[in-house]
Amino acid sequence: MPLRDFRLPEFDAPEVILPPGELEHETTIVNMGPQHPSTHGVLRLVLKLDGETVLRLVPVIGYLHRGKEKLAEQRTYTMIIPYTDRLDYLASMYMNLGYVRAVEQLLGIETPERGKYLRTAVAELQRLASHLLWLGSFALDLGATTVFLYTFREREIVVDLFEKLCGARLTYNYMRFGGVAADCPPGWVDEVRDYLDLQQARLAEYEAILTDNPVFRVRTEGIGIISAQEALNYGLSGPTLRGSGVAFDVRKADPYDAYGELDFNVITAQEGDCFARYRVRMDEMRESLNIVRQCLPRLQVPGEVSAKLPRVIKPPAGEAYARVEAPRGDFGVFVVSDGSASPVRLRFRSPSFANLSALDHMCRGMKLADVVAILGSIDIVLGEVDR
Amino acid sequence: MDRLMQYIELGWNFIAAHEVLRSLFAAVCVLVFMLGVVLVVIWMERKVSADIQSRIGPIRTGGPLGFVLQSLADALKLLLKEDLKPRGADCWPFYVAPYLVFLPAFMAYLILPFSATWIPQDIKVGILYYSAVSSVPVLGLAMAGWASNNKWSLLGGLRSAAQLVSYEIPLALAMLAAVILHGTLQTGAIVANQWQHWWLIIFTLPSLAIFLTAGMAEVSRTPFDLPEAESELVAGFNTEYSGMRFATFFLSEFSASFFISALAVTLFLGGWSLWGIDLWFAQHVLGWNTTAWDLANPATIPLLMKVFWFGVFVVKSFIVLWVLMWVKWTMPRLRIDQVLNFGWKVLLPIALLNLLFVSLVGLYVKRTNVEPIRLSLQQVAPVVVMQEAQRE
């Protein structure tokens, strides 16, 4: 739709009332994306600007819609796993995991001990990879190009580890009903341990270049504030919610896999601004390192990684909902089965979509440059928003 | 061979004898120098950024000559690109804008003292000339932003107008500090003064910091690269430009970066001189009679020394530019209102305080009858007033 035909009730709402004595400004409507360099994929934002101040903002989504949920109704349960890879393509493991856990509930099967720990370790490594990519692109949005290269260097190691695990570097297709597709190759655990030590040191490096950088601080502190109550009202989750001081984490609230047996903290920050979200993610990465470290001794113990299942899976009729704490928040999968080989209905609850809905609220009254910073701090993936 | 030398000398004398020809010759030399330097600067920017970001940078083109050929290849590629003009663009300003940015960038080079007596145009009001010339690119950037018929370009153009105008003042105040201390607006004389009184550098260091900060904003380098902030404004004022017109913007930006470093070296870091070490070396090691040298009379100084000084000047400028590159590749970008606030509320008061400090130093130096003050402060004051008046 061309910009001149763009009419939304939000834009016809009364203007921000200017204090008396101020000059009346003319407003402009600007189109940001879907080919804009910092809308993280194919997000389109239509902005109503007064100079560089944002009055209204409307996200236009759907450019990456592939009809995953409808497609799933035509496929068998196993065939759907690779489709979930393409939701949040920066955290495919979690997308696999969420779906697989929902079907496991339908089937009523348990994952073997080793499978559980492998899943947990892989999931936390995925969180690290995802947060690293977020950190790089967030810094890039703020104009700090160097951090991007640093974080990609470390993310590469995680991707290599995953490649050794399942052969793929982005769309892993690794989780299976009742376990994982393959056991880790020999020596993998030691490589993970080396990586953890390296990452611990490198995290301090990122902090040195960003956390105390005055320019970084003025660009993030007090920008895009959302209070705890508002965050809950918008249905935010993940670091975006915890940055507003709500200590909600699916791993604690509804423990799955090995999380119940592990010792870790839920990271929160009180301010609710971009810097708080940044701090939450930075500390979460440290926490992830801890969790993986705790999993490693258990991975030395040999055992089965997957439950035995028939080739064609026909879960009993019924419905199930499973949720996992993905890097971007609470990822939920709802499956309805009628006893046949493919689901009647599959529905994804994507955290990015809910988080994106709060963007307008966070951006009002901010400057144009802040929109980029706020969008970066929310950390959306369009594959998951549009599905 | 002798015959050839004779002809060269004859030609040289002919050029030197005619003011117009001499200026033209100097201008051509400066243009060649500037283009050559830009090629190296672009390559250096890529290499330094690669170094900081643990990459390798460009290695394929040109082999050992890559530092020139890489950028040359890039420029050639841009030359062959189609010169697009968006529908609805304001034709005339759109085509003129790049050259309006490029021309002042080139004109500024004319006052640089490249070596003792190697000054393309040794104008008596060199610094004043620079501050006049440096305000012209704003027009070009605003024109480019306006004429592109693109809202992002317009935002970029307006941003650059606001930013460049704001930072000209601290920049001028920092330059003024050097002017007051050395008692002249002539760039050549400022360097000669620093050559003789190397210790004055201690008092110019704060001015140097202010000058470089404001200078980074003047040439729009991170953290002040707002006009073309690619993560916000796509590419700012040059979004719609392609081919050689884009290359012209690019060229002016990099030549301006080098110029800012070169001017910083000229005003605060002793220009082409090595603060007297060069003199000591020439006297004691080479056994030259340096006391007979007279800057007013070029024939008294050996050519070798002048070439050496030229090298010193270029190396110093590159070192300053290198430092600017560190800043560029480690800092995030400020927001436009923060940039303006910083300029007016932080940098300007600091620059004024610094000016006061330098004036007191200048007064003291004059009281104790140390040589450096050539013009008395009373003579400088009207110039200050003039400059301020011109600004308003």
Image (tube, rainbow, N blue to C red):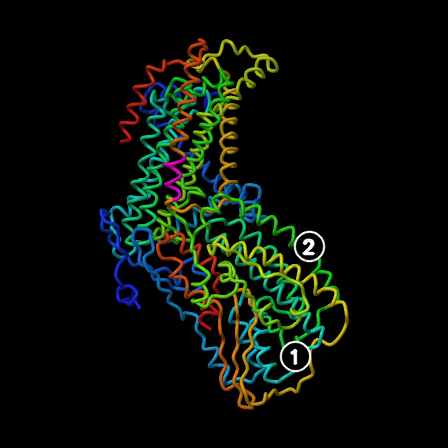
**Numbered tag placed on residue A178 in the rendering:** 1
Q: Which residue is mark 2?
A: A197
- Asked if the magenta segment contains residue B340, the reply would be yes
Q: Residues within 10 Å of mark 2 (few under 14, many from 20)?
A: few
The spot of residue A141 in percent (x, y) is 46, 53
Q: Is residue A111 left or right of residue A267?
A: right
Kindly give the residue lying farthest to the right in the view shown: A301
Q: Earlier in the sequence, mark 2 or mark 1?
A: 1
The spot of residue B205 in percent (x, y) is 48, 26
Which of the two residues, A275 or B134, is positioned nearer the viewer here?
A275
The answer to whether any part of residue A172 appears in the image is yes
Secondary structure of the residue carrying numbered label 2:
helix
Residue at 39% from the left image edge and 31% from the top image edge: B349
| Picture quarter with the N terminus of chain A | bottom left
Secondary structure of the residue carrying numbered label 1:
loop
The answer to whether any part of residue B28 appears in the image is no
Which of the two residues, B181 or A352, is positioned nearer the viewer here?
A352
Number of numbered callouts drawn: 2
Amino acid type for the residue under numbered disc 2: Asp
The chain carrying label 1 is: A
**Would you say the magenta stretch is mainly helix, strand or loop?**
helix
Mark-to-mark CA distance, 2 and 1: 31 Å
Which of the two residues, A307 or A317, is positioned nearer the viewer here?
A317
- Asked if the magenta segment contains residue A313, the reply would be no
The chain carrying label 2 is: A
Marks 2 and 1 close (CB-CB < 8 Å):
no
Above/below status of A206 relative to B353: below
Residue numbers of the magenta segment: B338-346
The spot of residue B388 in percent (x, y) is 30, 27
Amino acid type for the residue under numbered disc 1: Gly
